[in-house]
Amino acid sequence: MRKLALLCVTLLTGVVLAACGGTADMNETNKDGELKIGISLPSATHGWMGALIDSAEKQAKELKDSEGINYVMTNATDPNKQANDIDDLIAQKVDVIVMLPIESAALTPIGQKIKDADIPLVIIDRELENDSATVVVKGDNEGIGINAGKYFIEQLNGTGKVVEITGPPSSVTEQRGQGFKEAMASEPGIEIVASQSGEFSTEKSLEVMQNILQAQPEIDAVFTQDDGMALGVLQAIKEAGREDIQFITGAAGAKEVFENMNEDGLIKATFLYSPTMVADGIKIAAKIAQGEAPEKAMVVIEATQVTKDNVDTYYNSESKF
């Protein structure tokens, strides 16, 4: 009887130990199972993209502090590096990926890879060429082009020679350019005499505009798809001493552009495209990671026109952008 009792105690002890061991394993699983967002962005230290990266970092840290959601942020200088970064995030089994593609076409296959890995994908700014995104957060790129086109028609009274400075290959570039051309299609008196890429770079746009100014003896206005490029164009025009150009337009809402407007400079209008859109995307990603279905598959931010008449409403001297 004592042997039987001893056996029962031994078995019971084993069960308790096993249960304890099971609890320890479960705690370890919970620890390993903490939510994590992967964030893949281009690399930049200044300008619109620099401000976007700063906004992303702040929002991700806030979510980590407030809700315990971890994050991994990567920055790439070219599509190949970004694709490799995404492969690493997939290997880490992050719960959601937030990506701003450097180039739409080049990163479309990696979007499909994310979808095949059954990881939700929140795309910021530049769309992919397939349906791999769970949610897209962007500004109204076509609206920027349309609003700019309407502004050109109004300011030029339907007649003039126009230069277009575009961005690199992406949905943003395509949609802004398409909207601009569509808006002016009914105005045969307005001619686009040159269209070249400034690669969303002030320095590159300066170089490109210098060449255009040499090739085009008469220019009435310049449409740029980005405020940073508008500043490069402005510098080129000043250095060339050209006085035939009536105005420049940009897109985004940079502090330096607003200041040029207030000084009655050559940049007369821009169209809002805030870099803080990435914070909205990361918030959406956090909700998806927590099991919430997104309210919308497409979030579009209005392309509000800013001129000297309303620039004080949007100007912030403390802004980094």
Image (cartoon, rainbow, N blue to C red):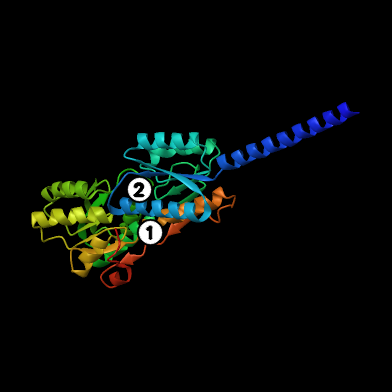
Q: Count of labels shown?
A: 2
The image shows residue 59, relative to residue 76, as above or below, that is below
Which class describes the residues within 10 Å of circle 2: few (<14), some (14-19), or many (20+)?
some
50 left or right of 230 in image: right
Mark 1, other Cα within 10 Å: few <14 / some 14–19 / many ≥20: many
Decide which of 296, 13 is in the foreground and name it: 13
Left or right, 156 with reference to 69: left
Q: Hey, what amino acid is under mark 2?
A: Glu
Residue annotated with mark 1 = 143
Identify which residue is drawn at 49% across, 33% down. 91
Closer to the N terminus: mark 2 or mark 1? 1
Measured as percent of width and height from the top left, residue 92 is found at 49, 36
Q: What element carries label 1?
A: helix
Q: Residue 254 — which label?
A: none
Using the image, determine if residue 149 lies above or below residue 15: below
Res. 225 in view: no
Find numbered disc 2 in the image and state the secondary structure of the residue it sits on: helix
Farthest residue, direction front: 2
Residue at 29% x, 62% y is 270
In what quadrant of the picture does the C terminus appear? bottom left
Closer-to-camera residue (305/232):
232
Q: Name the residue under label 2.
A: 174
